[in-house]
Image (cartoon, grey):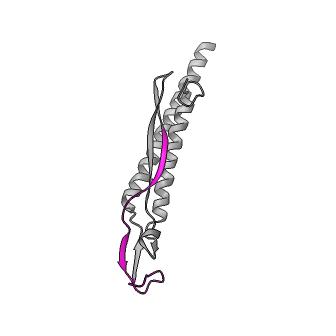
Amino acid sequence: MSSSGKGALTLFGLTGQAMSAQLVRMNTAASNLANAGTVASNAQGAYRPLKAVFATVLDRSTGLASVKVQGVYQSGATPVRTHNPDHPLADANGDVWSSPVDENAEMVEMTESARQYQNVVEAMQTGKQLMLDTLRMKTT
């Protein structure tokens, strides 16, 4: 029985979990990019980047390892304080705080997650084709 209690992990279950994890990773990077450059009137209100954290899941019945999203957590990165007294959100000192999103790192994260997603799709298609070829061999 798998750790999920639903029986042995199948090819489609395994790839489905991996695809879901990569989608979370991609959406997290997209959220960070969407909030890059946003400002707030104080450090507490500034957007902090999110990070998807994954955990390995071992299916004891098959010996296959998969991945699950353990959580999406807010970064402890410090917002960037900028003196801009003309900004409508400036505090009494004329400061605003912007999100500490590294846009280049987020683009790399998004690109990497898209590639991993595609790799999983290709692995699933290969497995499906092998299953179909096996079935055809048995019927001939």
Give the vertical position of 33 relative to 42 (above or below).
Answer: above
Q: How many marks?
A: 0
Q: Residue at x 53, y 24 (%)?
A: 130
The image position of residue 38, as x and y in percent, is 46, 71
Residue 97 falls left or right of residue 20: left
Q: Residue at x 36, y 77 (%)?
A: 82
Which image quadrant is residue 140 in?
top right
The image position of residue 19, as x and y in percent, is 52, 41
> Split into 4 quadrants, where in the image is the N terminus?
top right
The image position of residue 73, as x and y in percent, is 46, 53
Q: Give the camera-side residue of 114 and 95.
A: 95
Q: Is residue 74 magenta?
A: yes
Q: Residue at x 39, y 83 (%)?
A: 84
Which image quadrant is residue 105 in?
bottom left
The image position of residue 81, as x and y in percent, is 36, 74
Q: Is residue 77 magenta?
A: yes
Q: Residue furthest toward the right?
A: 139
Give the vertical position of 128 relative to 80 (above or below).
Answer: above
Give the vertical position of 116 relative to 28 (above or below).
Answer: above
Residue 39 falls left or right of residue 81: right
Q: Residue furthest toward the bottom?
A: 86
Residue 12 falls left or right of residue 98: right
Which stretch appears magenta?
A: 68-94
Give the vertical position of 22 relative to 98 (above or below).
Answer: above
Q: Give the camera-side residue of 109 and 65.
A: 65
